[in-house]
Amino acid sequence: MAMLCLREDAGKSWEKNSKAEFLRLCKNQMYSQKGNFESIEEKDLKRALYELCWLGVRGQLKVDAVVTTIIDVAAERPDVLSLIADLFGVLDVELSCTEEAADRERFLSLVTACQALIPDFVLKERLEADTLENLGLVQSKALFQQKYVKMKTKLYYKQQKFNLLREESEGYSKLVTELNQDFPDTTSHSTILQNIKSLIGCFNLDPNRVLDIVLESFECRPDRLGMFIPLLKEYTADEETICHILGFKFHFYQQTQDSITPDSLYNVAALLIAHRLVALEMLYPHLSPPNSEIIEKYKADILEAKQSRRKPVPATLTEKSSATEDNGKEDEKEKMEQTSHNQKFGLCEALIKIGNWQNAKTLMKSLPPFTAVAHKPLASCLCQLISYVIEPIYSKFCGLPSAVAQRRVKPSSFSSGTVQAFTFEDLPTLVFPLLQELGPHLVCDTVLLVKVNRIAKAYMTSSESVDDTADIFAGFLTVYDEVLLPCLSLLPGNCGISEEIWGFVKLLHYEHRYRLYGQWKNESYLHHARLIRARAEILDRSKYIMKRLSKENVKPLGRQIGKLSHSAPGIVFEYILSQIQSYDNFIGPVVDSLKFLTSLSYDVLAFCIIEALANPEKERLKTDDTNISNWLQSLASFAGSTMKKYTIDLGGLLHYIANQLKANKSYDLYVLREVIQKMAGIEVSEEITSDQLLAMSGGELLRQEGGCFTQIRNTKKSSSRLMDSFTEHHLAIPLCLLMAQQRFGIIFQSGSHQTDTRHTKLIGRLYDQCQDTLVQFISFLSLQLSASELTKVLPDICELMVTYHVQPDVAFGLWRVVFSTSIGAKFDDLRKMDKKDKQLNSQSVKIQRYIDAVEHVMNPVMELVRPINPLKIWDDIGLQFYLTFWSLAIYDIEVPIAAYEKQIQVHKTQQNAMEESKEIAQSKKKKEKERSTALMDKLEVERKQQEEHVKLVMARLKNEKESWFLLKSSKHSTITAILQMCLFPRCCFTAIDAIYCAKFIYIMHNLKTPNFSSLICYDRIFTDITYTMTSCTENEAHRYGRFLCAVLENLMLWHSDKSIYDKECADYPGFVTVFRSPSSHQNAVADHLDYENYRHVVHKWHYSLTRVSVNCLESGDYTQIRNMLIVLTKILPHYPRVSKLGTALERRVEKVVEEEKEKRQDLFTHALVYSGQLKMSKKHWILDQNFHKKEPDTKTAVRPTGSGADGINSSSTATGEGGKMVPPKASKAEIGEVKTEKMETSPVKHSSKTRSKETMSANDELTSQPVKEETRAKEPRESNSVKFGRDSKTSDAEWRQQMLSSETRRIHTQSDQLEPRQEVKRDSHERERVKEEKRLRQVELQRDPEDGQRDKSSKAPSDKSDKGSRGHSRESDRDRDFEQLTQPVDDRVPLSRSSEGQRLRAVESAKPVEEREIKRRKIEMSASKSPAFDRSEERERDARLSGRDLKDSAGDWEKKREPSRDRQDRKRLSSGVIGHKADGEGHEPKRHKGDDGGREKVGKANGSEPREKRKDPRQSSRSKERPRPKDEEFDRVLVKEEDIVIKEKMRTKELGEGRRDKARSKFDDHKRLKEDEYMKESRARLRDDSSGKDRDLLRD
């Protein structure tokens, strides 16, 4: 109700309405507070009456009206008169402070009017003396005041007791005798009380002293509880009196510090409190010390304990232990002395002893937490009470044998009022509160700790399923959280208690266990000073031990770690893990030192590992944000090693990883990978060698023996434990599916909804980690689970791929073992039926039974797979082929005989070494020999089994091949579907799958699979690998490289020998092509690709690889460069093989090395390693003409078999009428296919307008250039003359002159565009010597070639001539190859086309002598990197020889030289001097019948055998023509000398500074003599072989 206030003008309308309203409101207020007199609304009523009286005092309302209103209010509530009296007292005081006489008179009138209502004694109590005198209630103010003082003195200051002189001591003696006599059982307390009263009356005794003596007697005879308690109740009912007497007793023992309160007093006080003779609240103020002092000590103790962690650690462990023990004893003794004077603790202990838990709990709650139980006697007393309460239920569920249980000591009994627990339902109310109040101080009674733990274990095992929400279960968790586990931290290394607690904890789910460990480790140590000190001590000892731990002292220090971990495993392991994360070399010693732990400690270790992994304060990536942090790698390695060596529950760790995957976090997959690798021995590495990869294609034993980097042993038990953990927690298949989905989640799902800013390298590494872990996990499941078990837990193929969105590689990877095992089981069943009939034991019947088993198993699977893809895909590739490809493994199609033999030989070698060893005992030798022999026998049996299995599988493939590819789509569509749906997904899955894909292609070719073109398949693989390679991660690039290497292995095998090709390819349908007939009016004819055309095709593939490699290496993109280097490294055994392509590739790699040296170190390392390997493989390089013949057969144009677009364009041309070369005419379908392939194979980041010259195909023998093909398709066929711009009226000589001029001009331009190399720095002495050598060389060049050299012109050594004919400058080749790759497509010469080859021969046969001089200058420039050349002087000499001003540009000089060149060309043509060399390769090309001009027949590639000449009648006029000078001899010499320079530099670098100058001068002399000698010989040959005009040109 709101506060009631009367208005100032209420007196004017009082009688009309104000009075009625006032009474109504007062009545309502009184009714609302009726029954609750002390309500706060009573103030409102007082306020209303106060204002009413105040209106009467001020005169605003008549006194009669006020009195009448008071009477009306009092009629409703009589106690209002007491309020009125109080208000009169207030008004009296207020008016005494004012000087208003009128108000004083009106107040007296009002009080006088109310005297009839209020008694006089009430007014006398509340009004002042002056007012009472004015009212006439007292006669005199002075007399009243005097009487008031006397009364007050008598009440409060005068002692009410008997005179001691009047008391007789005999009375007290008789009283003591009466109270302490031996009362018979029949004596009642009433009789004793009557005797006491008689003594008091007879001897005039003080009743309070009598009560004190009764309490003293009770204190001495507590066993007479039944008599003293009723006696005290009847003697006095005043609690306050007894309380004061007890308080006086307690105060007596507080006078000195040495005085100790006796236990009997505590006991009497406790009994009186228990029987409600004394109230605890009244007695509590009499106890010492006060609460404020206790709280201050508690805070100081906590602060001191926290500061103790910062104290320095003692020098040695022994000193530390002894000092700690001494300090602990002293502190404990001091605390015991302090707490012995605490009367509150003593009273609480007495209350607990008599079983009065409620009052004891009230007393303990008034103190700081766990302060009372820190007093050891009190804690022991509480433990006894708990033991007594749980005795019935413990006797029932203790689990002890009956003989032991009978001898068990039972706890002491308490009062009959203490209730005991007989069932588990009694525990939450009777036991758990006591244990929670006791806390970690239960350590004082380890027996009780074990009892509570056994009761909890009995509860968990009493029923099959325990309700997690039940009060009993929650109570037990609370007890372990707050009492038992913290109590374990205070026990000094008690492993027995630890194992007892583990008996209950292991029955909990990992979530409850880890919650307990987390609270124990992180929370319990914050609230107890004793636990804080224990934590600091354990941490110091852990640091001390870890500083001294090494491999040599693992065992002794491991024992110390074990002792520490018994008490506080969380603290110890937290520090150990922090050290491991910082120092990974700690992992081995720490793992070995953990063998002394208890089961509970191992489980806490697993929790600490998970806690460290989930630490949000640590970054999982290094500062570059591209690599996983070292701490995570170290922690994962430690986890794997520990889990393998010791029995630890993995459920929590596995659930943690699964939850991380659900949250799209894949960093912690590294932990799972390490755990599986260590526990199951399954390694995943892309650095696996070829021998290991070969061994992985064998049986299980061969994979274990030869497929791993280290021999994995003793993993059977650990792998079984790991599989049991997966099975128990139902995580095997969920984890697999999560990893399969996470692979693409890493790429397409970022950590936030914003733009993904992760580095590409990081994404690739996370993908590889997820992929490798998935493959590892699938391998683990296939080894641990049987086919039936996998079938039960795995969803079917359709559900995996459709519902869970799992890719085929993972889905079939999971089911592949099931398929193979099911087929084997069905085959065995069928064979058992056949064995009954001997006629059915033939090999054909066996094969048929295997095929039947395959159909029985795979037909249902085929129906499941059919809905996965649309029907169009099944038209391109057969469903049976798709299923066969994905269901088989490399074990099914190939037997690694070499791997089996190697492992058998390894064991034989071990046996021989064992026999020769004298240090090994004979028993051990015998044992090892038996083991090796058994392994060899098992390997041999396994090999035979695999051979038999492969035969059956090959028979199955032969049976199925007819239905693989039907004629429902083109071959190109079929190949595209095979690559997209089968080969590319699987070859990037694992390294062994990459080999499988290559082998399966070979098998399809070898089986002569209908409607499958091996040639198109290989062409699609090698035409352009940019897209596939760019989309690969680092590990996928390794696998893709292995796939290409395996494919190249077969291709290069066929390329190496014609007989092998004829045997394995010539008559196979996979190499059938379309040959165009010479006449354009005839249709295409199908035929097989011959050996030479196949060599052209392989060269085209090598060129495609070179083009893509150069493009990627020059792209600047990190992913392209890295993946290209990885792929090139993998295919290095088979590529490059052509020196021209290898040189171009080498330059690009060297460029990458230079560019990335200071930028991206990983690319620099990749490129540098590959560059070194590439240089080592140069010895296997061959020349272009040795790799393939540059002129294919001219009778046909090659196209693979197929209609329309199924073929692939070949570089061969058809032969028209008259032997003229006619380019083939492309059909419309072919043009369309060429356009399509052009779009498909264009490299990344190069459009048709911006594509660099390196990416344009110059020697594309298999796929013609699209622009030219479109031109041929639109325009009619033209002759070679039209092709090369020759008019029909132009004579042969004029046309050849035009070709000669254009080619010579191009050579001049290219030679002028060669940029000089960077000049090598030399010292002044060497520079002068080099200048002198150059001057002598110039004089020698200008000398008449006939002077003194005629006698040597005919004595060119035959061996040198032979070498000069087949060798040339490597530097010149490198420059020419670079020009060939970088020149525009229109200027290149497609060597494989007959018309282009004819033009090239015509140009080569018209080369002038001037070209030789230019070429010689070019060779000298390329060799100028030798220190013997000075580039500035050579440029001057070149300018003088060519007549070019040094200031002229290349274009100006070209214009000046063009007329003279044309004039010289015409002179040379008229004189008949024509060169013979083609392509500058050092060999004369082989000519076919019908070619112009007689040529020498080329022998072997090395040019060692003699050449046979034959004459051409059309060239009889030139039959006596001298052979062309061999300029390459000088080129070879320079290159040879350059090599000598390089080798000499490397050698002299090792000699030292003292010997370097001497060796260099000796080498320079030798080099100068050799150069002069070969220069003279070259000039002599030029003199004899050249005409007079040539000599004039040379002299000029």
Image: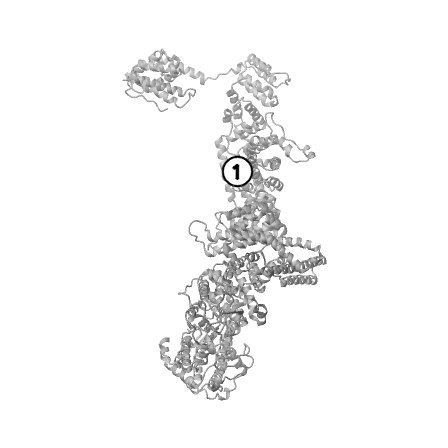
Q: Is residue 1225 left or right of residue 405?
A: left
- Amino acid type of disc 1? His
Q: Is residue 1007 visible?
A: yes
Give the camera-side residue of 552 and 608: 608
656 lies above or below 38: below
Q: Residue under circle 1?
A: 528
- The part of the image, by quadrant, that contains residue 433 is top right
Placement of the C terminus among the 4 image quadrants: bottom left
Percent x, y of residue 49: 35, 19
- Name the side, left or right, on which 850 lies relative to 1219: right
Quarter where residue 114 is shown: top left
Kindly identify the residue that appears in the image at 55 percent across and 64 percent down: 1047
Q: Position of residue 27 (x, y in %)?
A: 37, 18
Q: Is residue 773 visible?
A: no
Q: Quadrant of residue 1046?
A: bottom right
The front one of 302 and 1165 is 1165
Q: Considering depth in this image, is 292 or 619 the residue closer to the camera?
A: 619
Q: Is residue 933 left or right of residue 777?
A: right
Label 1 sits on a secondary structure element that is loop
Q: How many marks?
A: 1
Image location of residue 187, percent across then percent down: 62, 16
Which coloring applies here? one colour
In the rendered view, tell whether residue 827 sits above or below residue 85. below
